[in-house]
Amino acid sequence: MKKVLLFLIDSMMTDVLRNCLNKGKTPALQFFYQHGQLIEDCVTVFPTMTASVDCSLITGEYPDRHKVPGLVWYDPREQKIVNYINGAETVLTLGLVQCLRNALFEMNNRHLSSEVQTIHEVLEENGFTSGSINVIAHRGLQSYNVRPSFLLDAATGFSLSGVTSGPSIFSLGTLVKPAIFREVPWSVSQSLAASLGINDRYAIDVLIEVVKSGMQPDFTLIYLPDNDHKLHQAYRLAEEHLAQVDEQLVRFLNTFDSWEQALQQNVFILVSDHGQTLIGRTDEHNVNLDRLLADYAIHPLGKDDVQGDELVICNNERMAYLYPLREHLLSQLVELLSAERRIDLVAWKDGPWVNVLNGGKALAFCRGGSDVDQYGAAWTVNGAWEVLDLRLDERGKISFDSYPDALSRLYGALFSQDGPLIVITAAPGYEFVSEHMPTHLGEGSHGSLHKQDSLVPLLIAGSKRPLARPARLVDLKSYVLQEITSQTALV
Ligand SMILES: [Zn+2]
């Protein structure tokens, strides 16, 4: 029976992949391309940030069902901002310990809804085995003690120990190591973030050990983050960055007698979590939310409660969640934000309705009704369809262009939480900045609903079954489950 390997390559983009394939820069990806199916326009999740995407990938649901709103969001019950480990720059900016505790324990143990099942839980409840290497969202049936190295533990005030869950093969950098085979060595290097082992080389080291051990699970999800960090710092070198990811894939393929043998034994699925948008070089391309909303008492990052505050800003690069803490503020904020030309979409909830403004035009939609989109979801849509660039296809279904799967994805973000919140996205070429958040002038950034951030390549090799089009990242869970269960009597 073939195993399934799903590689999540952070910020892999279709045009970059195409250029690399044409120039012969990525031999492993070339091999998969020649032996499989390339879908160039797979739709990912909104916000286009790794944390929310990971949760959707393993649950097959948008955030309105899995309840992890994004990389950064506000928890009104705890009166605090939640942020997850997602790239070195965020970890270092927002505080390593807090990010690690959120990612290690809070996301998987508390935030990720118990109403949804992860792919690991479904597989292992049905007698299959599952694995997760360096993926932040990893809830499974097994409990694991997190054991940071002594130096890391000491450096973080001995606050990282605890219990988290995962599938039966589970690795999270140097914090949780698979116990069934030889430990993969990783030296504590100069920086704390590097010592965590959340990088491509370490993930592939672990994967090689998993396969060599003879205990490779039926399904393994492997997260390769390096491409994202590099694009944020040097967007112009995108092809070189992807070529370096490919070097790691080559290293894995070379552990087999031949690459063909790897394909005989495994189905390879390679997908990206989101794209990136090139941000303009000048300061004007930073939409400074603290400045724009300076008339309001903005909750300062790190403050223990929201006493006296009027507004919480949760910045997800090219998208932001805004939480008005007093009822009358919502309409004022919407008016102010929609007058800013560098903001693309302004959206908020009104009962079951989602209201959206774009360029002075308005649209409202809610679930249920006679308007059916190309993914089969039913809606009632009122107002100007150009707000979300909605069209009607030849079958009379709502189709999308500038904002892929716009209705379900925007709904998913707004209904990921109860209570009032406003979603804003930055116009192409712009990103939001706020207190302590990194900026990427002249480099890549992401987070928005726009197709530049939202359409990703998906490569499947070694399977006889094509993935149905139009493809979405949330449909990969059922594809993998069918791939595994269809090979056995337990269909
Ligand atoms: Zn990123």
Image (cartoon, helix red, strand yellow):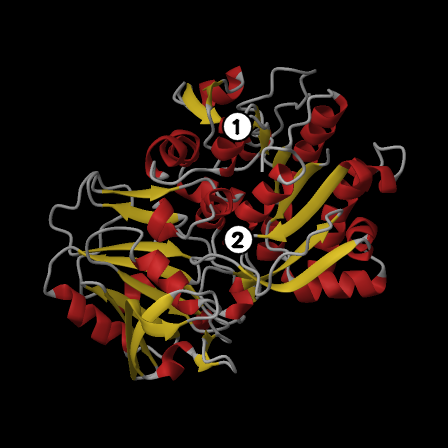
Task: Report the amino acid beneath label 1.
Answer: Glu
Q: Quadrant of the N terminus?
A: top right
Quarter holding the C terminus is: top right
Residue 101 in the image, given as x and y percentages of width and height: 39, 30
The residue carrying pointer 2 sits among few (fewer than 14), some (14 to 19) or many (20 or more) residues within 10 Å by Cα, namely some
As drawn, is 401 to the left or to the right of 240?
Answer: left
Rendered location of residue 433, percent (x, y): 39, 60
Q: Which mark is residue 475?
A: 2
Coordinates of residue 287 in the picture (x, y in percent)? 38, 68
Looking at the image, which is closer to me, 129 or 16? 129
Is 13 left, or right, of 150 in this rendering? Answer: right
Label 2 is placed on what type of residue? Answer: Asp
Q: Earlier in the sequence, mark 1 or mark 2?
A: 1
Q: Which residue occupies 52% across, 18% down?
A: 151
Q: Position of residue 16 (x, y in %)?
A: 70, 63
Q: CA distance from mark 1 to mark 2?
A: 19 Å
